[in-house]
Image (cartoon, rainbow, N blue to C red):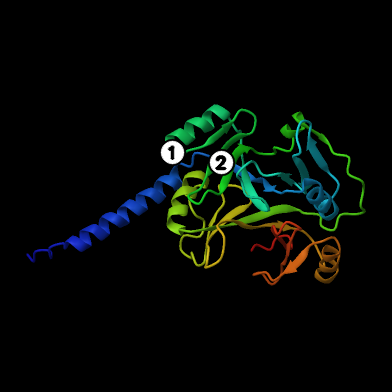
């Protein structure tokens, strides 16, 4: 009988590495610790809260809440919302401060145990869950789904004068794109938080996660001169490009080139990048 060829050290190491990667993906696929319904909300850090509130209320509608004891505001974006407040001491402004995928059946104690089990560092809040930083420091909030309801416990309707019909009526928060400095290191982190990637066989320039929800989170490698963090968030809505572009520019937005032909991309007055896609058209 012919003896099998001896396994070289290089082959053994390659087999071991492949097995380790496969085991890690199998674990994340088999045992996700969190289940999400959707991307619940985002928050931006801005120096002029009043200016930002007026812009978002004009573009997306006058459903606005304000914290009873602070400057933080919340503007409804269809089924989702965006929070805005001045940055804390030492924090950056004019950025997306954090994003929050909504956990189904959120339980504070159980979430804390899960984060400890994963060995992740976090900042705990008794009222709004947990904040976890990815390898580049981008903040992910872990809290309940449909959190627009519980924030009414500390916030009240804001007195924002009507500015006419909204320019955009969002139907969903479709996705958020996060730029990272090291894709593989970030994938390992987000697999712990969101579960397995959803495009494992075709990972080109972006790596996608869903967390079991209807919306998605994408990772992209930051190029030269590009900043890590949330690059843009995307809403779906019905729109007509020419008229919407003109209306957005009239209220202070800047129309910019996008990477989806069917979409419309713009910057808010703080430079935050927003993408609009027609419903049922994914980026």
Q: Which residue in the rendered view is the most extreme toward the front?
A: 90
Q: Name the residue under label 1.
A: 118
Where the N terminus falls, by quadrant?
A: bottom left
Say which residue appears at 65% left-offset and 53% top-offset: 95
Say which residue appears at 85% left-offset and 39% top-offset: 158
- The one nearer the camera, 31 or 64, is 64
Q: Quadrant of residue 7?
A: bottom left
Q: Which tag is nearer the camera, tag 2 or tag 1?
A: 1
Q: What element carries label 1?
A: helix
Q: In which quarter of the image is residue 15?
A: bottom left
Q: Which residue in the rendered view is the most extreme toward the left?
A: 1
Mark 1 nearby-residue class (10 Å; few <14, some 14–19, many ≥20): few
Q: Is residue 32 left or right of residue 44?
A: left
Mark 2 nearby-residue class (10 Å; few <14, some 14–19, many ≥20): many
- The one nearer the camera, 196 or 72, is 72
**Position in image of residue 17 (x %, y %):** 29, 56
Say which residue appears at 89% left-offset and 40% top-offset: 159
The numbered mark, 2 or 1, whose residue comes first in the sequence reads 2
Give the Cα distance between marks 2 and 1.
15 Å
Q: Mark 2 points at which residue?
A: 35
**Position in image of residue 127 (x %, y %):** 65, 29
**Position in image of residue 161 (x %, y %):** 92, 46
Q: Is residue 23 left or right of residue 63?
A: left
Q: What element carries label 2?
A: loop
Say if mark 2 contacts mark 1, CB within 8 Å. Answer: no
Where the C terminus falls, by quadrant?
A: bottom right
């Amino acid at each position: 009988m012919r003896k099998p060829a001896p396994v070289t050290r290089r082959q053994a190491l390659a087999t071991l590495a492949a097995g380790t990667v496969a085991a890690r993906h199998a674990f994340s696929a088999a045992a996700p610790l969190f289940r999400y319904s959707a991307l619940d909300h985002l928050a931006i850090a801005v120096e002029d809260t009043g200016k930002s509130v007026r812009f978002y209320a004009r573009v997306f509608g006058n459903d606005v809440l304000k914290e009873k004891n602070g400057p933080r505001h919340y503007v409804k974006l269809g089924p989702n919302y965006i929070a805005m407040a001045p940055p804390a001491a030492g924090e950056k402004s004019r950025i997306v401060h954090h994003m929050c995928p909504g956990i189904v059946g959120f339980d504070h104690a159980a979430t804390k145990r899960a984060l400890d089990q994963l060995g992740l560092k976090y900042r705990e809040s008794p009222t709004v869950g947990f904040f976890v930083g990815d390898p580049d420091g981008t903040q992910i909030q872990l809290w309940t789904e449909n959190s627009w309801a519980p924030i009414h416990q500390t916030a009240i309707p804001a007195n924002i004068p009507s500015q006419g019909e909204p320019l955009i009526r969002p139907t969903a928060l479709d996705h958020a794109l996060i730029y990272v400095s090291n894709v593989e290191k970030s994938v390992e982190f987000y697999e712990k938080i969101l579960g397995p990637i959803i495009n494992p066989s075709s990972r080109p320039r972006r790596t996608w996660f869903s967390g079991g929800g209807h919306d998605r989170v994408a990772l992209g490698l930051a190029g030269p001169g590009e900043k890590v963090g949330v690059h843009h968030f995307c809403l779906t809505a019905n729109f007509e490009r020419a008229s919407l572009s003109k209306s957005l520019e009239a209220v202070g937005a800047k129309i910019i080139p996008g990477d989806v032909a069917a979409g419309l991309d713009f910057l808010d007055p703080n430079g935050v990048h927003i993408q609009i896609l027609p419903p049922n058209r994914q980026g």
